[in-house]
Structure formats: C-alpha cells, structure tokens
Amino acid sequence: MNKIEPIFFRMPYGLYSRVLIVLLKFLGIKIGKKNRFEPGNIVMINQIKIGNNNAFTKGWRLWPEVSPSIKPKIIIGSKNYFNRNLFIDACCSIEIGDENMIGPDVYITDSNHSYGKGINPHNAPMQKGLVKIGNYCWIGAKVIILKDVELGDYCTVAAGAVVTKSFPKGSLIAGIPAKLIKNFNDEK
C-alpha cells in the first residue's frame, strides 16, 4: 500500500500538467522542457516565456496585463520552484532567473496604482516599472515584491517581507519595508 499511495495521489497532477503544457504550446506559449504545473491560472500566454525544469504548485497565477505587446511581460528562467499560491502580476516586465526557490503565498508585481488627493481609485492610472530577480534566490513565504525592485543573485528574503527597493548579490533582507540584515558577499 505504501508504494501505491504516492503514485495514486501524484498521478492526477502529472496528467493535468502534461495536458496543460500541450494546450499552452498549442495556444502559442514559449515554454521549455520538463516543466510541471499543478492547477493554476494563466492569461495572455503570448506574453509569457518559461524556461526548462520549473515546478509550479497548486494555486499559481501568471497574470500579464491584457494589452498588445511584442515582447513577453513575464520571463521565467529554468529550474525554479514556485510553492503554492504564487501570483505574478505584470504590467510591464517581471524577470525571474534560474534555480530560485519561491515560498507559498508570494506576490510579485511591477506596478502600483496612482493615489492622492482628488484621485478616484477606480480611475487611477497605473505606475509601471520593472522587477528582476536574479539566480539562486530564496524568497520566503508571504513575501511581497513591488515595482522597480532588482534582487541580485543569491539573495534571501525572509518570510513576510515587503520588498520596495533593490538589493545587491548575496543580500539577506527582512521586514516591512525590507531592509538589509546581512550581505554574505562582505564575509571573508
């Protein structure tokens, strides 16, 4: 029974993933090999590019702005792991490098709504920017990454952090707003 049980519970997700990838390729997504998708949501697939060997667990959302665009708004490298309930919300450009670990309930966006005196929130124009996450980063649970943020390679973001500015390679960051706790590149 112990050998059959894992196969029985994993099989539906494996089948779902294979069928979804065939459908996405048919619809024109740029996607590499050996990716795995549990159930999630995707829109504007022609504005998404995904490398090889990525894993998306249950509840993911890839959500580029619904607008004409020649280049992809979401670019994901290879060998990334995205835990449950990931939300990537792109109006301009979000790039994620290779071999990153993204915890559950992470929200990444490259835009903010305008706000201020006399601005109706329903009609507020979007302030669009960029987000770039390097390689080998570890993003903890419930992290929020906002527009105009660049994380260098080997960054670690503590659970619950709200990242509002960029950090260099090897940074350990935490807090609301996120602050540098330690930079591993400074160690001798």
Image: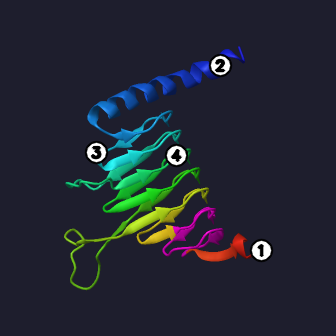
Q: Which mark is residue 5?
A: 2
Q: Amino acid at mark 3?
A: Asn
Left or right: 37 in relation to 169: left
Q: Nearer the viewer, mark 4 or mark 2?
A: 4
Q: Marks 1 and 4: in contact by CB < 8 Å?
A: no
Task: Kindly report the distance in space between the C-alpha atoms of the residues bearing marks 3 and 4.
Answer: 18 Å
Which of the 4 image quadrants contains residue 135?
bottom right
CB within 8 Å, label 4 to label 2: no
Residue at x-position 60% and y-position 58%: 137
Q: Say what secondary structure mark 2 lies in.
A: helix
Q: What's the residue type where badge 2 is placed?
A: Glu
- How packed mark 4 is, by other alpha carbons closer than 10 Å (few <14, some 14-19, many 20 or more), is many
Q: Which mark is residue 46?
A: 3
Decide if residue 35 is in sight here.
yes
Q: Magenta segment, principal secondary structure?
A: loop
Which corner quadrant of the image does residue 151 belong to? bottom right
Q: Which amino acid is tagged 1?
A: Glu
- Horizontal arrangement in the rendering, residue 182 relative to residue 74 (left or right): right
Label of residue 78 in the image: 4
Nearest the eye: 124 or 78: 78
Q: Position of residue 56 (x, y in %)?
A: 50, 41
In three-dimensional space, the C-alpha distance between marks 2 and 1, rounded to whole angstroms, equals 47 Å
Residue appearing at x 41%, y 52% in the figure: 75
Judged from the image, the secondary structure of the residue bearing numbered disc 4 is loop
Where does label 1 land, which residue?
Answer: 187
- Give the Cα distance between marks 2 and 3: 38 Å
